[in-house]
Image (cartoon, helix red, strand yellow):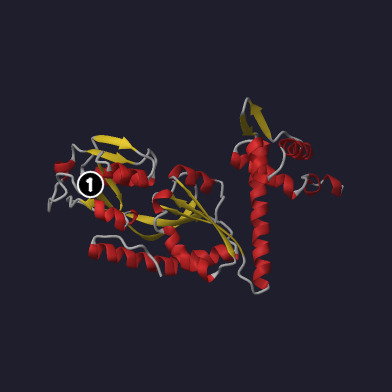
Amino acid sequence: MSSSRLPARIGTFRQLEILMAIAESGGIAAAADRLHLSQPTVSMQMKKLADNIGAPLYDLSGRRLALTHAGELVLQHAREIFDCTDRLEMALDQLRGMHKGRLSIGIVSSAEYFAPHLLGPFYRRYPSIEVAFNVGNREELSARLKNNLDDLYIFGFPPTDTDVELTELGENHLVVIAPKGHPLATRQRLRWEDIADELFIVREEGAGTRIAVEHHLQRLGYSLRHQLTIASNEGIKHAVLARMGLAIVPSLCLDEGDQRELVQLPVAGFPLLDHWNLVFRRGKTFSVVAETCRQYLLDEGRAMYREATLYWEQHQRPKLPTR
């Protein structure tokens, strides 16, 4: 009978939305707050959905909530359903001659200095589009990519445990920085041996910049003997300004103010050369808006970044990619 088919039993879109909120926020209370609902309402809707599915959707152990296998399956397909409705809405807007819709971009934290500048002209061109920038460290962005939560991602080192497609956006120069008052700040030429015993301020384990630095140093036969970990480039710059140590950072994270207080040390073998990549899940179905943005980034965005890179190479100071 038709009434026994899953579409007739699965409940409402709202129930699927609540399940997604529970999974993404980590609990009933957080999901209720996010959706402006009461906790009893959230619990009741999830009970109805579980009854219709015929299996529990999550387990509660103390304050910890974990989705069951059935809950994970429903969550996965709920996301696909909402992706489909988003694409339908945007396609209908396109038929009406309007550039409307939603665009979600995941940006690894080291790229937050330049990525908004790349996307600025796109947003000004299509001001009716709702754009969400989700900035996080590599581990957080890898989890979002694995769960297919965003349309596009900007990574230095994409995760290797998810099937993705990637295209290089541009070069990432990693430079050694020191405070201007450092004894080595006035030297015209340095070898690694001159700085090998310095304390280095580094990103957390698993961060893309740290992986890139360790990979390149190993290739050059170098290593960081003394390290202090800070989980943001902004925090690292302030630690260097406070004369806590040296650091290796992306050149474009240094603004004009940093240039007055920090120096790039002329160490042989530097800058280290890495790349930024535009990444998405292999086989992903793009909305019209997401595909338009992808093409924009690979064309105009990449050209803007190339201009900024050439400026840095010529002047040894950053210029944000703007138009």
Q: Which residue is mark 1?
A: 178
Residue 237: x, y in percent?
31, 46
Point out the residue furthest to the right here.
Answer: 1
Q: Nearer the viewer, residue 131 or 156?
A: 131
Crowd around label 1: few <14 · some 14–19 · many ≥20 (10 Å): many
- Does any portion of residue 273 appear in the rendered image? no
Residue 142: x, y in percent?
48, 45
Residue 136: x, y in percent?
46, 46
Point out the residue furthest to the bottom here.
Answer: 97
**64 vs 17: above or below:** above
Q: Secondary structure at mark 1?
A: strand
Name the kind of residue labelled 1 in the image. Ala
**225 vs 156: above or below:** above
Identified at 23% across, 65% down, the residue is 314
- Does any portion of residue 101 appear in the rendered image? yes
User: Where's the C terminus, which quadrant?
Assistant: bottom left
Identified at 24% across, 34% down, the residue is 226
Residue 68: x, y in percent?
65, 34
